[in-house]
Image: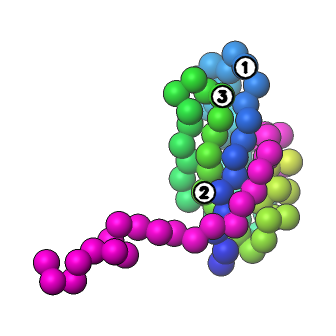
Amino acid sequence: MARFVVERDLPAGLEDGDIDAAVQRAIAANAKVSGVRWVHSHLALDNSKFFCEYEALDQEAVREAAWLAQIPCDRVTPVREVSPHDYADPAR
């Protein structure tokens, strides 16, 4: 499965309850779209952006899940994981 990072620009003034409700809608929507799995997310401290990593069949599936959840999906970028462990010195 491919990996994607979704950048969501959030409206000003969101509170924790708004974020919680959106996350619950996303969980329900992801369960309805075949081949979409939410891996994890990072929320900007000022609640202005959400950066979400997904595994999915394609970008359209990610966008469909966002549409069903009624949450922003401003940018979807195909990515590959890069980790410090990939560059660890094997002599250590």
Compared to residue 1, the image places residue 41 above or below, namely: above
On screen, residue 90 versus residue 62, left or right, reads left
* Helix, strand or loop under label 2: strand
Q: Which residues are magenta?
A: 68-92
Identity, as a three-letter code, of the amino acid under mark 2: Glu
The residue located at (35%, 66%) in the rendering is: 84
Frontmost residue, 92 versus 65? 92
Q: Which residue is mark 2?
A: 53
The N terminus lies in quadrant: bottom right
Q: Which residue is mark 1?
A: 12
Q: Where does the image place residue 52, in percent across and percent down from the top left?
A: 62, 50
Identity, as a three-letter code, of the amino acid under mark 1: Ala
Identity, as a three-letter code, of the amino acid under mark 3: Ser
Compared to residue 62, the image places residue 81 above or below, namely: below
Badge 1 density bin: few <14, some 14–19, many ≥20, Cα 10 Å: few
* Helix, strand or loop under label 3: loop
Q: Earlier in the sequence, mark 3 or mark 2?
A: 3
The residue located at (62%, 46%) in the rendering is: 51
* Helix, strand or loop under label 1: loop
The residue located at (69%, 52%) in the rendering is: 6
Residue 34's quadrant in the figure? bottom right
Could you tell me how far apart the alpha carbons at marks 3 and 2 are, in whole angstroms? 17 Å
Frontmost residue, 2 versus 35? 2
The C terminus lies in quadrant: bottom left
Q: Where does the image place residue 7, in percent across and percent down from the top left?
A: 69, 46
Q: Which residue is mark 3?
A: 48
